[in-house]
Image (tube, rainbow, N blue to C red):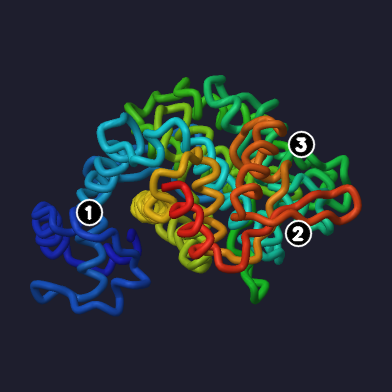
C-alpha cells in the first residue's frame, strides 16, 4: 500500500480518500487484490487506485488483536463488514436459543441419535481433510460396532470422534493448556511415529513444521518453538475472554480466531488442523451455540480444500487482515446450518414415511429410525452393541428392540461364532405393510 501511494500525487490521494468515504468498498464482498485485479475498476480509477481506495475504506472500524502476534509484518486485525453482520445474525438466531429448533432436535427421544450421527460425520470428514482414506460406511460400522481400528486411517477417525466428545464434555470449563494438550493427545493417539509427541508442544530441538502446498511451496512458517508456551497461554486467555483489551469480540468471531490461532502457531508435530477445529467447536459450545454440535464444518471444508488454504494465504498477503479467514468461515458455518436443517428435515420425513407404513403398530422411535435406515440402506447389519451405541441406550434395551423387530418379521437374525447380527428382510416395505395389515 505504501509503495502504491508513493507513485501518486497528493491531490489524487485526497480524491481516493473521498472515494473511500462512500463506504461501498468495505460493505460489499471482501475482495482480495488477487481477485480485484481481474475486475473492471469503477469511476475511471486504475486497478491500483481502486485497491488504495478500498484499503482506505477498510481502515475505519478495524479491530486489532494485540496478543495474536505475527511472525512478520503488522499486527493481526479484522473488520466486520455488512455481509459479516448478516451472517453473524443468521448464526446467532439459528445456532443458539430454541425459537427455530428443528423438530428432530426438539424431540428428546431422537436428539441423541442425531447428535451421535453428526459427531460421527464431523469426525470422518475432519480426518479425511488430513488424508484419512477409509470409506464413510466402514468408519460408521467401526464406531457403532465398537471394533478396534484396522489401520491408521480408521484410528484417526476414532480419535477425532473421541476428541469431539471430550471437547463437548469440557465446554463449561475455561480453556487451559492442559485441555489443549489432552485434545491433541486424543486426536493423535496411536497415529504418530513418535508417540511421545502426542499432547506435547514442539521444542527448540524439534524440526518445526512448515506449512506448504502440494507443490512444496512454503505457505507459512510458524513461530519459533521457544515462543510456543507463552503463545499458548495467551491463546487460552483470549479464548476465555480475559484479553479483550481491544474491545468486544463477538463469540463466533472469537471461535473463528481461536481456530486460526492454533493453526497459525502450528505448535504440534501433526494434528494441528484437527485440534484447531475441535477448539472451534469447544468455543462455540461454551458461548451457547448448542446447535453447532449437529453441524459438520469439515464436510464443507473437504469439498473445497483449496478455498480453506486460500483464506489463510489471503490473510498473510494482505497485512495480516484476518477478515478474509473470518468471512470464509462465517460462510462455511452458514452453509453447514442450512445443510443441517435439510438433513434433519429429511430424517423427520424418513420416520414419518416409516410411520405411514406401520400405521398404528406400536414401535418406539429407535425402532422406527432403524427401519428408516434399513429402507435406504439395504444390507446394513445391526448388532446389540451398534444399536445401543447409536441410541445411547443399554445393551438390554437394544436387545429388546432388535428381537421385537425380528419377531415381527422385519429383521432376520444371523450368528457368526459368538456374534449376533440382524439384517432387514428382503422386501421390507411389503413386510411392513403385512405387519400393519395383521395388526388391524
Secondary element under disc 2, as helix, strand or loop, is: helix
Secondary element under disc 3, as helix, strand or loop, is: loop
In the image: residue 209, left or right of residue 333: right
Mark before the other along the chain sequence, 1 or 3: 1
**Residue 33 position in % (x across, y down):** 34, 68
Q: Residue at x 45, y 23 (%)?
A: 241
User: Could you say which is closer to the camera, residue 283 or residue 354?
Assistant: 354
**Residue 128 position in % (x across, y down):** 64, 61
Distance, label 2 to label 1, CA atoms, is 48 Å
In the image: residue 401, left or right of residue 98: right
Distance, label 1 to label 3, CA atoms, is 43 Å
Q: In which quadrant is the N terminus drawn?
A: bottom left
Q: Are marks 1 and 3 in contact (CB under 8 Å)?
A: no
Residue 178 can be seen in this image = yes
Badge 1 crowding class, 10 Å Cα cut-off, few under 14, some 14 to 19, many 20 or more, is many
Report which residue position mark 2 lands on.
Answer: 153
Measured along the vertical axis of the image, is residue 49 above or below residue 76?
below
**Residue 335 position in % (x across, y down):** 36, 55
Mark before the other along the chain sequence, 3 or 2: 2
Measured along the vertical axis of the image, is residue 396 above or below residue 333?
above
Mark before the other along the chain sequence, 2 or 1: 1
In the image: residue 174, left or right of residue 423: left
Q: Residue at x 62, y 59 (%)?
A: 424
Report which residue position mark 3 lands on.
Answer: 199
User: Could you say which is closer to the camera, residue 74 or residue 304?
Assistant: 304
Q: Residue at x 46, y 65 (%)?
A: 307
Q: Quadrant of residue 181?
A: top right
Q: Residue at x 59, y 38 (%)?
A: 391
Report which residue position mark 1 lands on.
Answer: 56
Frontmost of labels 3 and 2 is 2
Amino acid at each position: 500500500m505504501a509503495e502504491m501511494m508513493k507513485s501518486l500525487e497528493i491531490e489524487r490521494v485526497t480524491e481516493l480518500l473521498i472515494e473511500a468515504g462512500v463506504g461501498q468498498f468495505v460493505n460489499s464482498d471482501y475482495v482480495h487484490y488477487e481477485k480485484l485485479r481481474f475486475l473492471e475498476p469503477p469511476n475511471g480509477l486504475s486497478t491500483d487506485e481502486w485497491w488504495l481506495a478500498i484499503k482506505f475504506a477498510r481502515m475505519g472500524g478495524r479491530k486489532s488483536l494485540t496478543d495474536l502476534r505475527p511472525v512478520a509484518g503488522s499486527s493481526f486485525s479484522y473488520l466486520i463488514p455488512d455481509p459479516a453482520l448478516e451472517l453473524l445474525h443468521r448464526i446467532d438466531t439459528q445456532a443458539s436459543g430454541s425459537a427455530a429448533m428443528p423438530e428432530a432436535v426438539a424431540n428428546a427421544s431422537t436428539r441423541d441419535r442425531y447428535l451421535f450421527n453428526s459427531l460421527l460425520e464431523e469426525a470422518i470428514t475432519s480426518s479425511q481433510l488430513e488424508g484419512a482414506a477409509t470409506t464413510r460406511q466402514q468408519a460408521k460400522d467401526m464406531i457403532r460396532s465398537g471394533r478396534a481400528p484396522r489401520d491408521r486411517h480408521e484410528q484417526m477417525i476414532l480419535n477425532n470422534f473421541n476428541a469431539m466428545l471430550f471437547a463437548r464434555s469440557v465446554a463449561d470449563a475455561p480453556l487451559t493448556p492442559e485441555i489443549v494438550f489432552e485434545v491433541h493427545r486424543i486426536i493423535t493417539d496411536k497415529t504418530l511415529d513418535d508417540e511421545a509427541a502426542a499432547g506435547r508442544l514442539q521444542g527448540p530441538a524439534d524440526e518445526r513444521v512448515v506449512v506448504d502446498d502440494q507443490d512444496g511451496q512454503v505457505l507459512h512458517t510458524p513461530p519459533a518453538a521457544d515462543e510456543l508456551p507463552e503463545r499458548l497461554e495467551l491463546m487460552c486467555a483470549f479464548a476465555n475472554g480475559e484479553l479483550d483489551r481491544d474491545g468486544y469480540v463477538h463469540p463466533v468471531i472469537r471461535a473463528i480466531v481461536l481456530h486460526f490461532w492454533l493453526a497459525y502457531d502450528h505448535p504440534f508435530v501433526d494434528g494441528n488442523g484437527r485440534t484447531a477445529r475441535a477448539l472451534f467447536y469447544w468455543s462455540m459450545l461454551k458461548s451457547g451455540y448448542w446447535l453447532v454440535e449437529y453441524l459438520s464444518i469439515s464436510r464443507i471444508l473437504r469439498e473445497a480444500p483449496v478455498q480453506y488454504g486460500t483464506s489463510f494465504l489471503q490473510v498473510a498477503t494482505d497485512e495480516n487482515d484476518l477478515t478474509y479467514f473470518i468471512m470464509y468461515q462465517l460462510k462455511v458455518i452458514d452453509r453447514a446450518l442450512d445443510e443441517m436443517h435439510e438433513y434433519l428435515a429429511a430424517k423427520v420425513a424418513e420416520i414419518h414415511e416409516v410411520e405411514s407404513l406401520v400405521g398404528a403398530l406400536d414401535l418406539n422411535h429407535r425402532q422406527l429410525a432403524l427401519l428408516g435406515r434399513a429402507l435406504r440402506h439395504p444390507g446394513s447389519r445391526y448388532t446389540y452393541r451398534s444399536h445401543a451405541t447409536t441410541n445411547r441406550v443399554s445393551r438390554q434395551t437394544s436387545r429388546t428392540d432388535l428381537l421385537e423387530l425380528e419377531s415381527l418379521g422385519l429383521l432376520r437374525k444371523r450368528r457368526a461364532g459368538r456374534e449376533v447380527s440382524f439384517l432387514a428382510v428382503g422386501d421390507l416395505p411389503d413386510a411392513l405393510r403385512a405387519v400393519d395389515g395383521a395388526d388391524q
